[in-house]
Image (cartoon, grey):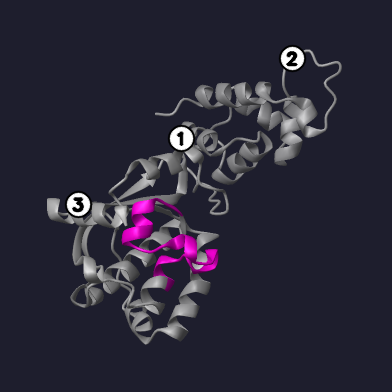
């Protein structure tokens, strides 16, 4: 059972860590660090008395709506907001997604370290944001495309001859549409709004996409296999795994590994070309 004192102590600690100057407030004549209770109450649109009781563990847990306003008033980040909601016995709010934020240099170094495993980072609406050299050689050279064209669904349905073995095309088409529907629904806004625009574009351009979208299938990404036709270099069998990026719920990491030693040799040959 959640103890109201735990939430109260946590909120007080967060309040005392705040710098008044960062909120345009004077730091003069303050007997305690941080912002005053009345300043947080005003920012959160709650009464000073009620907020004081909340920090003292009195009066029961706040509603999710009130706690969200308090979290905003305290400038809590996503991890801190989640912790406050859990202490209050509420389901944590959806993380605030920001597909526009760049991939960190550390994550790019992870990609680059996978020398013979094609890998990329995708957004919640399946724009490819970062990739390694193996992905450029085996999958698609994303660097040659305009940023708005580096979208997995656009590439698949508007450039269907992009190397996937024809016998795998239909199976893969069903899978990616069902997975895209599930992932964008789970991501919520604003990803859902951006996904709706992409879906409208693809429905108009691809009758097959429209039919698959209207089937309303859903799948999880997980793991699977793919076969790529590299022309003179032959077929390359790949196994893929999808991973969440810690601290960035708007991003997903997809890594392809050679299915057999022969496939690894073909990839190594492509990397040397």
Point out the image quarter for the C terminus.
Answer: bottom left
Magenta segment includes 253:
no
230 left or right of 47 in image? left
Mark 2 or mark 1, which is nearer the start of the sequence?
2
- Give me the C-alpha separation between circle 3 and circle 1: 46 Å
User: Residue tagged by mark 1?
Assistant: 86
Query: Does 109 sit above or below residue 59?
Result: below
Numbered circle sitting on residue 32: 2
Residue at (40%, 71%) from the top-left corner? 155
| Extreme-top residue of the structure | 31
Question: Does dot 1 land on a helix, a strand or a loop?
Answer: helix
107 left or right of 189 in image? left
Residue at (50%, 34%) from the top-left corner? 88
User: Residue tagged by mark 3?
Assistant: 264
Camera-nearest residue between 165 and 55: 165
Residue at (49%, 69%) from the top-left corner? 149
Q: Position of residue 180 (x, y in %)?
A: 37, 65
Question: Which label lies toward us, 3 or 1?
Answer: 3
Residue range corresponding to the magenta coloring: 130-154
């Amino acid at each position: 059972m959640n103890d109201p004192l735990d939430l109260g102590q946590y909120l007080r600690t967060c309040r005392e860590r705040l710098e008044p100057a960062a909120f345009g407030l004077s730091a003069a004549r303050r007997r305690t660090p941080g912002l005053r209770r009345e300043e947080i109450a005003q920012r959160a649109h709650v009464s000073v008395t009620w907020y004081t009781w909340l920090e003292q563990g009195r009066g029961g847990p706040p509603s999710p709506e009130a706690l969200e306003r308090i979290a905003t008033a305290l400038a809590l980040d996503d991890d801190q907001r989640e912790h406050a909601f859990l202490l209050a016995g509420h389901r944590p709010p959806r993380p605030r997604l920001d597909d526009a934020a760049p991939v960190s240099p550390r994550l790019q170094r992870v990609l680059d370290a996978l020398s013979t495993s094609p890998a990329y980072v995708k957004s919640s609406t399946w724009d490819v944001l970062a990739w390694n050299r193996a992905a450029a050689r085996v999958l698609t050279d994303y660097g040659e495309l305009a940023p708005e064209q580096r979208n997995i669904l656009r590439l698949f349905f508007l450039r269907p001859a992009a190397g996937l073995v024809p016998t795998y095309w239909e199976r893969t088409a069903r899978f990616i549409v069902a997975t895209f529907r599930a992932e964008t629904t789970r991501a919520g806004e604003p990803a859902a709004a951006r996904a709706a625009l992409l879906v409208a574009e693809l429905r108009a351009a691809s009758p097959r996409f429209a039919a698959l979208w209207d089937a309303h299938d859903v799948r999880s990404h997980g793991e699977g296999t793919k076969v790529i036709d590299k022309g003179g270099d032959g077929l390359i069998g790949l196994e893929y795994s999808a991973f969440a990026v810690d601290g960035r719920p708007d991003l997903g990491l997809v890594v392809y590994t050679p299915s057999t030693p022969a496939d690894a040799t073909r990839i190594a040959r492509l990397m040397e070309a």
